[in-house]
Amino acid sequence: MRRLPLLAAALALLLAGCVPTARSSTLFAMDTVMELTVYGPRERVDEAAELIHDAEGLLSVTAEGSDIALLNSAGEGEVHGETAALLARALEICALTDGALDITVYPLVRAWGFTTGEYRIPEDGEIEKLLEGVDYASVRLEDGAVTLPRGALLDLGAVAKGWTADLIAEGWREAGVKSGLINLGGNVMAVGSKPNGGDWVVGIRDPFSDGLVGAVSVRDAAVVTSGGYQRYFEEDGVRYCHIIDPQTGRPADSGLTSVTVIGAEGVLCDGLSTAVYVMGLDAAEELWRENAGFELALVTDEGEIYITEGLEDVFTPMDGYENTEIQVIRRG
Ligand code: AMP
Ligand code: MG
């Protein structure tokens, strides 16, 4: 009998070793609420929070002294290795999307008031003038030295969270983490599987209500959503969203109201979610057919749902969408 407490203690230790405890942290950074959960030591969460603050310090377009703010005020300069690496990848995604993603579109983002919240509709002439500086292809990047074209201002806001999630996930995997969830304001990265071995289930917000349009079951994947409903203003009954079409200099109005991109690389998913929101359904289908590495879940202004075929078995409609016909986009 005297051995029982000892046995119980040994069993408790054994079980604790099998199922790691969840450590979580909620923080506000990059203008959004973030949540980190890791099944492992608290250190992992603390390291990730530090990484997020460091990334924001380098990349924020508004933070004084960031690489991007310094570049934008001088038009040229040296940047840190991390900034250069993201810049290089972002420029590739701009090219891949034929400029639907354009990291030099910031003068327009600012003119519409999305930086300060002092929203306004710029005059046609002002838009034309500002568009002259928008051209990602003229950004020069050589050994960490960057030169911007005249009139261009950089903004990595469309890719920074996805890239940061990649860095955190990489660090966690190297440290042996088998299970974790990184949620950077709706920009989600699932690391490994759930602690019980099942898939992570990530909800996709309904652009028309507070509920969900559905959820996807994933492991080791980013799930990134861009939507006009995330940040916008209204004037005379017209809604103006924070994603700008670099062709027109005006808020994108492609017929899509929510774009979710799912794939292994967070920065690609983040860049593509913004770009596909600009491109619209037909161009998105073409982009998906011509490239590997990502899947799409799209909601149109009319509330129709389109998914690419890789999501057929992992997407579940919810909250009133259960009977909506889901259109599947196929390769062939
Ligand atoms: P996301 O939330 O990832 O879709 O990124 C939207 C943010 O990226 C906006 O708040 C702007 O700062 C910036 N942005 C808006 N339109 C574009 C665009 N066409 N290309 C690149 N960045 C953009
Ligand atoms: Mg994005």
Image (cartoon, grey):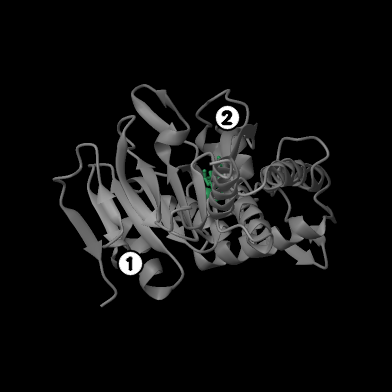
Give the left or right position of residue 67, taking residue 288 as reference: right
Residue lying farthest bottom?
Answer: 332
User: In the depicted view, which residue is nearer to us: 9 or 76?
Assistant: 9
User: How many marks on residues?
Assistant: 2
Which label lies toward us, 2 or 1?
A: 1
Residue that badge 1 annotates: 310
Residue behind mark 2:
113
Q: Is residue 263 something that shows in the picture?
A: yes
Q: Is mark 1 within 8 Å of ligand 2?
A: no
Q: Position of residue 99 (x, y in %)?
A: 53, 60
Q: Is residue 310 above or below residue 258?
A: below
Q: Nearer the viewer, residue 12 or 170?
A: 12
Q: Could you tell me residue 302's position as x and y percent? A: 22, 42
Q: Is residue 280 visible?
A: no
For marks 2 and 1, the one nearer the N-term is 2
Quadrant the C terminus occupies: bottom left
Q: State the CA–CA distance, disc 2 to disc 1.
A: 38 Å
Q: Quadrant of residue 102?
A: bottom right
Quadrant of the rendered image containing residue 138: bottom right
